[in-house]
Amino acid sequence: MEKQRKSAFDRLERSGYLPQLRQLAKSLCAPFWWHGQEGNRYKILHNGTVCFLHTGERLIAVTADHVFRQYLEDKSRYEVFGCQWGGSTIEPENRVIDRNESLDLATFDISEVFTGAAGASVHYPVKWPTDPIREREVVLFGGFPGTLREEKTVTADFPFQTFATGVTAVSPDNIKLHLDMPNIHWPFHEREVFNPELGGASGGPVFRVVEGRPIDRLEIVGFIYEYSMTLDVMFARHASSLALDGQIL
């Protein structure tokens, strides 16, 4: 990251602006995790990320379809099995609106009562779909990487990991975000190692920051579906892939 942008991020971090944005982004999604029991041994099997938004017509939850597929595969193998979105127990197969394997998206019908119990809030974009993202536009994105989770006896803590960077490329199919892990800037944590294992962030949101009066706001523009460690690139689907009713276009 160039020196000028590093200095800008340092100022935003010091002012408290970036921490507030990260906390807001985290509040609009939750870890999608499930666990099984073999004998007396309890273990978390996998996790992803799910985010919550209202299109103006319907409140929906969104994640990557491969996360949901893994959930279904694991559920078929365990007699004692449970799933949670954040702090709420759920059987997401009973709430499916639509799935698309090629776009790697899945949507679910959800209520604000549920999201509140899960410890999350609902994102309300001003309009749906939101305006298309542009190359070089700065976005904030993240999720709940599995390598950071701390398993307890019957639950777990899931740290939310975020990035702020410019959009590398935009195509009709996806949004590409080059992370540049070897040179990533983590304000005021220069001596600490940044987690490079991002499995579990799939389904997480990509937000643009909209300057407004009286306050700035986040606006969702995409959903993470893949991270390539080889290319050091995060891939996301456009928010416009979803119709007002949650169907995948």
Image: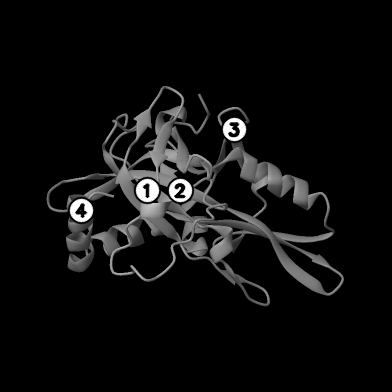
For residue 86, the mark is none
Whether residue 29 is visible, yes or no, is yes
Label 1 vs 3, first from the N-terminus: 3
Label 4 vs 3, first from the N-terminus: 4
Relative to 245, 20 lies left or right: left
Q: Nearer the viewer, residue 227 or 204?
A: 227
Describe the element under mark 4 as helix, strand or loop: helix
Look at 53% across and 57% down and name the residue there: 145
Whether residue 94 is visible, yes or no, is no
Q: Nearer the viewer, mark 4 or mark 3?
A: 4
Across and down, in percent, residue 160 comes to 45, 61
Describe the element under mark 3 as helix, strand or loop: strand
Q: Cα distance, mark 4 to mark 2?
A: 35 Å
Label 3 vs 2, first from the N-terminus: 2
Q: Which residue is mark 4?
A: 3
Q: Which residue is mark 2?
A: 52
Q: Cα distance, mark 3 to mark 2?
A: 15 Å
Q: Nearer the viewer, residue 59 or 103?
A: 103
Amino acid beneath label 4: Lys
Do tag 1 and tag 2 residues touch (Cβ < 8 Å)? Answer: yes
Q: Nearer the viewer, residue 178 or 242?
A: 178
Look at 34% across and 35% down and name the residue there: 168
Q: Nearer the viewer, mark 1 or mark 4?
A: 4
Across and down, in percent, residue 73 comes to 76, 46
Do tag 4 and tag 3 residues touch (Cβ < 8 Å)? Answer: no
Label 1 vs 2, first from the N-terminus: 2
Above or below 202: residue 171: above
Describe the element under mark 2 as helix, strand or loop: strand
For residue 98, the mark is 3
Q: Which residue is mark 1?
A: 123
* Location of residue 106 by image quarter: top right
